[in-house]
Image (spheres, rainbow, N blue to C red):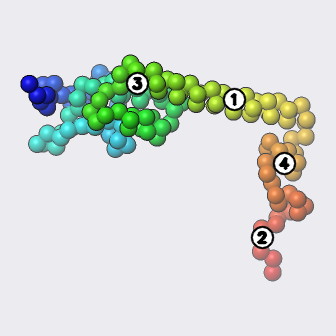
Amino acid sequence: MTDSAPTSAQLLTIGELSRRSGVPHTALRFYERQGLIHSRRTTGNQRRYDRGTLRRIAFIRASQHTGVPLAVIGEVLALLPAGASPSKEFWERASECWSKEINARIARLERMRDRFTRCIGCGCLSFDECALVNPGDALAELGPGPHRLLRS
């Protein structure tokens, strides 16, 4: 016995997918344009989605809630075989990746907090000297005033 394409009764309309996933139609269309989900078209050009799309949407939304950018989510989803839904093992592997990214983001935020705390302790609040407010200001070395204005 060979696998056959799902019947129309087994496919979801965009409205059904929206209701079941809690994701607005507009977001579903956006996900599709980004290649995160896929639909089939009826002869009347209406979108129809496999039921497995619900798992993909759950994965997308959970990943977004952890702060993972859609571009990165798309890269990970691209590792799935065509038409496959994220499995438990897939979620676990992605979770390991997300954990590394989240830990790196936490470390960056902690460094920012520490720099800000040092800045408050310094008390300078100077746009001319403060490395936090004005980092890497090469023009400050030229002294005060505008240095990019054309002089006649």
Residue corresponding to mark 3? 90
Earlier in the chain: of badge 2 and badge 1, it is 1
Dot 4, crowdedness within 10 Å: few (<14), some or many (≥20)? few
Residue corresponding to mark 1? 107
Earlier in the chain: of badge 2 and badge 3, it is 3
Nearer to us of marks 3 and 1 is 3
Name the residue nearer the viewer: 24 or 41. 41
Amino acid type indicated by mark 2: Leu
Q: CA distance from mark 3 to mark 1?
A: 26 Å
Nearer to us of marks 1 and 4 is 1
Q: Measured along the vertical axis of the image, is residue 8 above or below residue 150?
A: above
Amino acid type indicated by mark 4: Phe
Nearer to us of marks 2 and 1 is 1
Residue farthest toward the top in the current orientation of the protein:
88
Name the quadrant containing residue 59: top left
- Residue 42: image x %, image y %? 14, 39
Amino acid type indicated by mark 3: Phe
Q: CA distance from mark 2 to mark 4?
A: 19 Å
Q: Is residue 58 left or right of residue 17?
A: right
| Image point (63%, 31%), residue name | 105
Note whether residue 50 is visible.
yes
